[in-house]
Image (cartoon, rainbow, N blue to C red):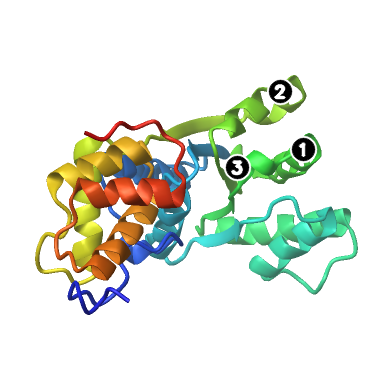
Amino acid sequence: MYLDYYELKKFPFRTNPDPQFLWLGEKHKRALSFLENGTLKRDGFLLLTGDVGTGKTSLIRYFLRSTDASAIIAAISNPMMPALDFYNFLSEKFKLDNKLSDKADFFIHLKKFLLKAYSEHKLVFVIIDAAQTLDHERLEEIRLLSNIEFENQKLLNIFFVGQNETETILMDPRNKATSQRINMSYQLQNLDEQETIHYIAHRLKVAGANRGIFTDDACKKIFDIADGIPRLINSICDCALLSGYVEGRKIIDPIWIRECQIELRIPIGTIFI
């Protein structure tokens, strides 16, 4: 592959989330502050949204690695698993008693656990990833989790993390009781042109690059095609590095970005001159 050719130690543009490569621009720093503040305020429900590929999952993984070691966290990537599996998953994450037989059993043990954590000044929260997949019934079950209080303090913080359509789901009149409990929300925006240039340079540096590989014009074309979405930026850059390696090009210019747009079948009507 192209690692030796470009003198890289790691593949810089894999599309799977990797906190090591996370680039914290202003938008991501604000989102991270939003998550950090939410853990301290016991605000109940919080909502983080963004387009597909904007880096929500990468941000969450970075947050989980850097959060207070005493915090107790359950991160759920498949919230639409069967109901009893959902409760048993939380039971396992929170190290409650053995496998539960029903919902009532779960809530008895959960309340004891949360009261004990509160007495030990430990924060407990659930991160619901892929929140755009939630239906009304599961939202109601999640809402019930937040009913447990002590001295007017919420004992469990719940973070919804999902695509932008999550907000549409929450606006459904049937979900009013849940949406009214969301005290903080943040929408992670796509990168702008300059941020895209810095993002590409950052990932190359983390991968071991000691020189520039993409021209500024190439980065600008990548921004035009990807619309500032990190996952698409990664796909285009990886394709361009492979094409450059095959064709013996040490520097990637806009022509290789055009080739990758065609190869990846990205349906954006960017005009190349």
Task: Report the quarter where the N terminus lies.
Answer: bottom left
Q: Secondary structure at mark 2?
A: loop
Amino acid at circle 2: Asp
In terms of depth relative to the viewer, which is nearer, 112 or 264?
264
The one of 266 and 50 positioned closer to us in this rendering: 266
Res. 202 visible in picture: yes
- Disc on res. 8: none
Name the residue beneath numbered marker 3: 154
Q: Nearer the viewer, mark 2 or mark 3?
A: 2
Q: Residue at x 59, y 31 (%)?
A: 165
> Which residue: 72% across, 64% down?
89
Quadrant position of the C terminus in the picture: top left
For the residue marked with disc 1, what is the amino acid? Glu
Which residue is located at x 18 percent, y 51 percent?
A: 253
Q: Position of residue 71 (x, y in %)?
A: 49, 61
CA–CA distance between discs 3 and 1? 17 Å
Residue at image position (28%, 53%) is 23
> Earlier along the polypeptide chain: callout 2 or callout 1?
1
List the residue tagged with mark 1: 140
Q: Which residue is mark 2?
A: 172
Q: In this picture, is 110 found above or below 207?
A: above
Secondary element under disc 1, as helix, strand or loop, is helix
**Tag 3: residue type?**
Lys
Left or right of 258: which side holds 170?
right
